Image: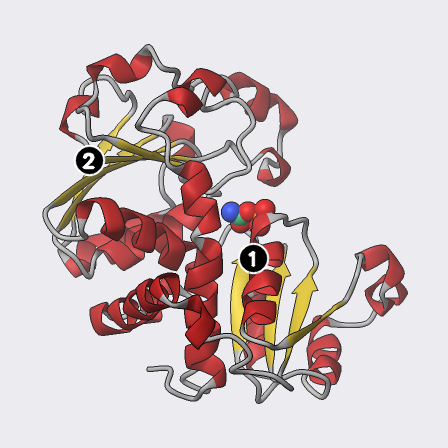
Amino acid sequence: MRQDHLITATQLSRPDIEAVLDRAREIDGSREAFEQRYSGSVLALCFFEPSTRTKMSFETAAKRLGAETIDMGSIESSSVKKGESLADTVRVIEGYADALVLRHPSEGSAKMASEFVDVPVINAGDGAGQHPSQTLLDLHTIRERHGLDDLTIGIMGDLKYGRTVHSLASALTNFDATQHFISPESLRLPRSVRFDLHESGAQVREHTELDAVLPELDVLYVTRIQRERFPDENEYHQIAGEYRIDADTLSAADPDLTVMHPLPRVDEIAADVDETSHARYFEQAHNGVPVRMALLDMLLGGDAA
Ligand code: CP
């Protein structure tokens, strides 16, 4: 496999992460120095699942770098509808583009796609698997406010199906972070993720309730219950509505607590939290542009680790 595919956060070392985040900080400081750097390059956006932030921020990032984007459009209007395989689809698209961003409902799809093409593949979410570019923008958001060492983070909600959580938990093992996972028993982190965290020596605690741990946290990362991934709709309805925070919940938190969410939210963060100094989820989403510019700069420029 090429070393410049980004498939999973487990492939990211601390120097890899710091290189991307340093570049993102540089871009934030002098965006004009990076404009038009990739004039003539083409980024393919292949989204087999809905997206607002990931797709549009990659598109904005590419355009700010001077690159063009091409897009499969909806699945309904593409030849996927005629039964074309993912392997054939990406083999065709690599002839049109210098890099490929792929979101797909099947776990492992990005890795599989990367084995069929010679251009860099960025996993933009593979089912309940991984979402590593989201993790890079999450880490950028955390680093700019708290730094990444001596960090206490709570990660709450759907830890079983939440791919942003799987990637973030893994990437945080590169740093001196204590991770508190807060979820119902049925939505605990998958066994494979817990195993990897254990093997890495990460400081990890699991809880079913937020109250006891909230005052200790520097960051609370809230996630949506992933309705679309529940095999049983009844189970979703039993859990939905639990693990919701509002401004009153946060009265017990440290004044410097940062509340994050990869978005979209449904109702797990009440609108009154938006008005507090804790809310950073819109800033987090906006950070997708400089971080994805940094990532594309490193992948297209050939200096990816
Ligand atoms: N955070 C995230 O992946 O959002 P989208 O599904 O809108 O891309």
On residue 218, which mark appears?
2
Sequence-wise first label, 1 or 2: 1
| Label tally | 2
Q: Which mark is residue 13?
A: none
The image quarter containing residue 36 is bottom right
Give the quadrant of the C terminus. Answer: bottom left
Q: Name the residue at 64% across, 86% down.
A: 40
> What is the x, y in percent for residue 214?
21, 23
In the rendering, at what x and y percent does residue 153 appear? 23, 39
Give the CA distance from mark 1 to mark 2: 27 Å
Image x and y of residue 100, in percent: 61, 75
In this orientation, which residue lies closer to the viewer: 59 or 100? 59
| Cβ of mark 2 under 8 A from ligand 1 | no
Q: How is the image coloured?
A: secondary structure
The secondary element bearing badge 2 is classed as loop
**Dot 1: element:** helix
Picture quadrant of residue 97: bottom right
* Apparent side of residue 290 relative to residue 11 in the rendered image (left or right): right
Which image quarter: residue 81? bottom right
Residue 172 vertical placement versus 215 (above, below): below
Mark 1 vs ligand 1: CB below 8 Å: yes
In percent of width and height, residue 93 lies at 72, 80
Q: Which residue is mark 1?
A: 57
Q: Is residue 220 above or below residue 167?
A: above
Q: Residue at x 37, y 61 (%)?
A: 28
Up-down relation of residue 91 to residue 279 (above or below): below
Name the amino acid, label 2. Answer: Asp
Spot the residue most to the top.
248
